[in-house]
């Protein structure tokens, strides 16, 4: 019997779009990002698991915009985190409070990515060992998906559909760098997501654009 392929839906990395691209594939399972310990427990049981990651600078902007600028809140978790972030004046102030924000059970879209997919027995999450067999990158999702389809014997999806499905945004990506006009904002993100930058190969500096 062939091993099942499991997607862990890392928050704000295009994972919902990737799930849609895989919905007609046989033997593909999905692990949701609804609760940290539950997701990690399921990953330990998976035959072969993969996920997508994203540059922490742009992932954070995406999460912030989703919480603050989606008119119709998706669920109670969305409403709760919206209320929590509403006490801060703007994105820059929010970033200075990431430690407090991520102490909330509703802050699933802001948690460092390695918290979800690295195994650790107890206490503070830390980098490694990985609970997934393959880490792909949002920035190269089109070609990474082709690799996934070939590696796992899945039916390929046309390139144009991959691109249309994955690279959608409520806010033009050309505006993403505007969120980092303060050096203190850049420094706070580099510090809080330091393990993500290192573990997933992202440079420790603000890119010009996504």
Image: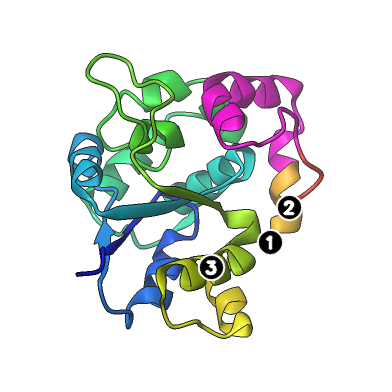
Does 200 lie within the magenta span? yes
Quarter of the image for residue 172 reads bottom right
- In the image, 174: left or right of 50? right
The residue identified by callout 1 is 172
Residue 100 vertical placement versus 49 (above, below): above
The residue identified by callout 2 is 175
The residue identified by callout 3 is 145
Query: Label 1: how many residues lie within 10 Å, few (<14), some (14-19) or many (20+)?
Result: few
Q: Which residues are magenta?
A: 178-206
Where residue 138 appears, as percent x and y from the top left, is 58, 55
- In the image, 153: left or right of 5? right
Q: How is the image coloured?
A: rainbow
The residue most toward the front is 1
Give the residue drawn at x 41%, y 77%: 154
Q: Secondary structure at mark 2?
A: helix
Report the Cα–Cα distance between label 3 and label 1.
24 Å
Where residue 10 appears, as percent x and y from the top left, is 40, 49
């Amino acid at each position: 019997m062939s091993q099942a392929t499991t997607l862990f839906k890392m928050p704000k990395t295009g994972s919902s779009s990737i799930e849609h691209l895989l919905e007609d594939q046989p033997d593909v399972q999905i692990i949701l990002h609804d609760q940290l310990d539950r997701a990690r427990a399921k990953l330990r049981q998976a035959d072969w698991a993969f996920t997508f990651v994203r540059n922490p600078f742009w992932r954070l902007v995406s999460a912030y915009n989703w919480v603050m600028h989606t008119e119709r809140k998706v669920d109670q978790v969305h409403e709760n985190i919206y209320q929590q972030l509403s006490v801060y004046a703007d994105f820059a102030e929010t970033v200075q409070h990431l430690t407090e924000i991520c102490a909330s059970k509703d802050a699933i879209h802001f948690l460092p990515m390695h918290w979800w997919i690295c195994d650790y027995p107890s206490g503070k999450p830390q980098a490694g060992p990985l609970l997934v067999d393959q880490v792909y990158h949002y920035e190269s999702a089109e070609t990474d998906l082709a690799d996934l389809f070939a590696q796992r014997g899945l039916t390929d999806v046309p390139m144009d559909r991959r691109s249309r499905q994955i690279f959608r945004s409520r806010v033009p990506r050309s505006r993403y760098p505007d969120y980092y006009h303060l050096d203190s904002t850049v420094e706070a993100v580099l510090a809080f997501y330091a393990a993500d930058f290192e573990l997933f190969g992202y440079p420790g500096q603000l890119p010009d654009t996504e």
